[in-house]
Image (tube, rainbow, N blue to C red):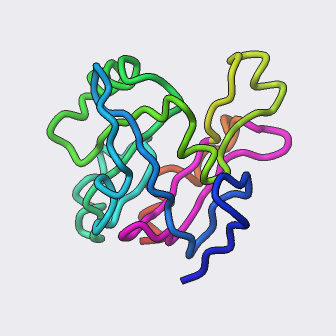
């Protein structure tokens, strides 16, 4: 297993073979701090959302136990989004990365000035990561120089692409 990251907190993007950092994410409202190792440790998970609810059976058949969605947002927003997406009882869980701990640690902080003008504060790049027992197996980032938010070509993070790489 490699760990190419120069040091904790580095802004270099996480890569295949790296260990996912064991930072805390927030769950529920009022928020409860949950170590990432409790969420993904010992499991094969995918970290992203679009279309994943509809493809749960296919994901499970390929050994995925959980789909973890986290955002640089507070838990009240994440809970409301989870209700809107009807994730209760599914393999999908939503978490808040309110202080960007995970986002910064894995080098996915979105600080492009064009995005900052619209959103005001740093967010997270659109990405999907396949993690098996805290080890990164694949990383997909939709962002590019011309499209820092990844809105123009998000397909690399869609479930159909992830299923090809499991």
Check the image and report above or below for 126 versus 162: above
Q: Residue furthest left?
A: 89
Identity of the residue drawn at 73% across and 52% down? 11
The answer to which of 89 and 10 lies nearer the viewer is 10
Q: Looking at the rendering, in which quadrant would you find the C terminus?
A: bottom left
Q: Quadrant of residue 134?
A: bottom left
Identity of the residue drawn at 71% across and 16% down? 120
Residue 142 part of the magenta-drawn span = yes
Residue 70 part of the magenta-drawn span = no
Residue 152 drawn at (x, y percent): 70, 37
Residue 136 drawn at (x, y percent): 50, 68
Identity of the residue drawn at 24% across and 29% down? 86
Residue 83 drawn at (x, y percent): 26, 23
Identity of the residue drawn at 84% across and 44% down? 145
Check the image and report above or below for 29 versus 96: above
Residue 32 drawn at (x, y percent): 29, 31
Give the left or right position of residue 159, taking residue 33 as reference: right
> How many numbered tags mark residues here?
0
The answer to which of 80 and 29 lies nearer the viewer is 29
Give the left or right position of residue 140, taking residue 24 as reference: right
The answer to which of 137 and 101 lies nearer the viewer is 101
Give the left or right position of residue 165, taking residue 155 as reference: left
Q: Which residues fall within the magenta stretch?
A: 126-148
């Amino acid at each position: 297993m490699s760990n190419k990251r120069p040091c904790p907190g580095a802004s270099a993007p996480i890569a295949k073979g790296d260990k996912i950092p064991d930072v805390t994410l927030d769950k529920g409202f009022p928020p409860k701090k949950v170590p990432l190792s409790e969420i993904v440790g010992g499991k094969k998970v995918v970290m992203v959302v679009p279309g994943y609810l509809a493809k749960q059976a296919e994901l499970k058949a390929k050994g995925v136990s959980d789909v973890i969605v986290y955002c640089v947002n507070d838990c009240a927003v994440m809970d409301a989004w989870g209700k809107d997406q009807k994730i209760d009882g599914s393999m999908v869980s939503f978490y808040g990365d309110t202080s960007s701990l995970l986002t910064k640690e894995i080098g996915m902080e979105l600080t492009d000035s064009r995005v900052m003008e619209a959103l005001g504060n740093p967010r997270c790049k659109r990405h999907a990561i396949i993690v098996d027992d805290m080890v990164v197996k694949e990383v997909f980032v939709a962002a590019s120089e011309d499209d820092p938010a990844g809105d123009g070509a998000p397909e690399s993070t869609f479930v159909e692409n992830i299923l090809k790489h499991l």
